[in-house]
Each structure stands twice: as C-alpha cells, then as structure tokens.
Image (spheres, rainbow, N blue to C red):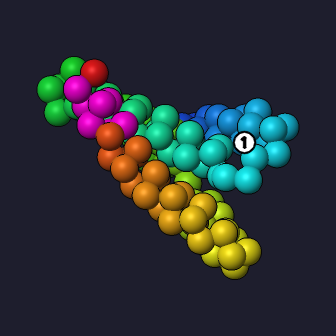
Amino acid sequence: MNYLLVFVGGGLGSICRFAISQLLQRYQLTFPWATLLANAVSCIIFGVVAQALLKNNLSPSYRFLLLTGFCGGLSTFSAFTNETWVLLQNGSFFYAFTNILLNLSVCLFCLYLGMKW
C-alpha cells in the first residue's frame, strides 16, 4: 500500500511541478524561478506535514503520500543542479550563485514557516 501512496503522491507532485514550469515559461525568464517556486512550495508543505506527523495529528500513511510522494515529485534537486550548471556554463555567475543562495535560504525558511504554520 505504501508503494501505491508514493506512486500517487509522486505523480501529483510531478504534475504540479510541470504546471508551475509551464505557467512561468511564457515569461521567458533568464532565472530559473519555476524550480525555486516548486522547491519553496514543497518545503512549506513538507514542514506542515512533518510537524503534523510529529504531533500525531496525521496517519503515518500521509508521510508516504505527501512527503515521499508529493513533495518528492514536486521538488527537484536535479533540475536545480542542472539549471545552476547551465548558468555557470553560460558565464552567468551572478545568476548561478544567486540561484544557489536563494534555493538554500528560501527553502530553509519555507520549511521553518511550514513547521510553524
């Protein structure tokens, strides 16, 4: 059953990730905002669910559905890494290091925010 929960959650998270990417793609941005937004939203959800699990307000099955599945499908370290690499290869050092700093700081803050929510 846990595999099914991860499968369903991961699919839904991936669809949300794709939708965010499609929505922001029309603006032809030079900075990878879609990945940052997907990672930030995922961290907020992760924080809310993790805190609820710690307080025993949720069934442990939600860990597989929402944390491993949905947040795993929505957030994307591989896209973040590739986009940073492309920025570095193109000589956009400022954007590359800004991307690293923003992903780390924003996502840590969003996780904290989610846990306090």
Residue at (39, 33) in percent of width and height: 44
Dot 1 alpha-carbon crowd within 10 angstroms: few under 14, some 14 to 19, many 20 or more: some
Residue 111 belongs to the span the image colors magenta: yes
| Residue at the front extreme, as displayed | 94
Quick one: 70 or 89, which is closer to the camera?
A: 89
- The residue singled out by tag 1 in the image is 21
Residue 66 belongs to the span the image colors magenta: no
Question: Does 97 appear above or below 17?
Answer: below
Query: Residue 11: in sight, yes or no?
Result: no
Q: Where does residue 104 sit, x and y in percent of width and height?
A: 39, 55
Q: Where does residue 72 sit, x and y in percent of width and height?
A: 49, 48
Quick one: 9 or 114, which is closer to the camera?
A: 114
Q: Is residue 41 left or right of residue 54?
A: right
Q: Is residue 89 left or right of residue 109?
A: right
Question: Does 110 appear above or below 97?
Answer: above
Hey, which quadrant is residue 45 in on the image?
top left
Q: Where does residue 113 sit, x and y in percent of width and height?
A: 30, 31
Please identify the quadrant where the C terminus is shown. Answer: top left
Query: Residue 45: in sight, yes or no?
Result: yes
Question: Does 35 appear above or below 5?
Answer: below
The chief SS type of the magenta part is: helix
Residue at (15, 26) in percent of width and height: 55
Q: Where does residue 109 sit, x and y in percent of width and height?
A: 32, 40
- Count up the numbered dots: 1
Residue at (25, 31) in percent of width and height: 115
Secondary structure beneath label 1? helix
Residue numbers of the magenta segment: 110-116
Hey, which quadrant is residue 1 in on the image?
top left
Residue at (76, 33) in percent of width and height: 23
Query: What type is the residue that disc 1 sits on?
Result: Ser
Q: Is residue 102 left or right of residue 11?
A: left
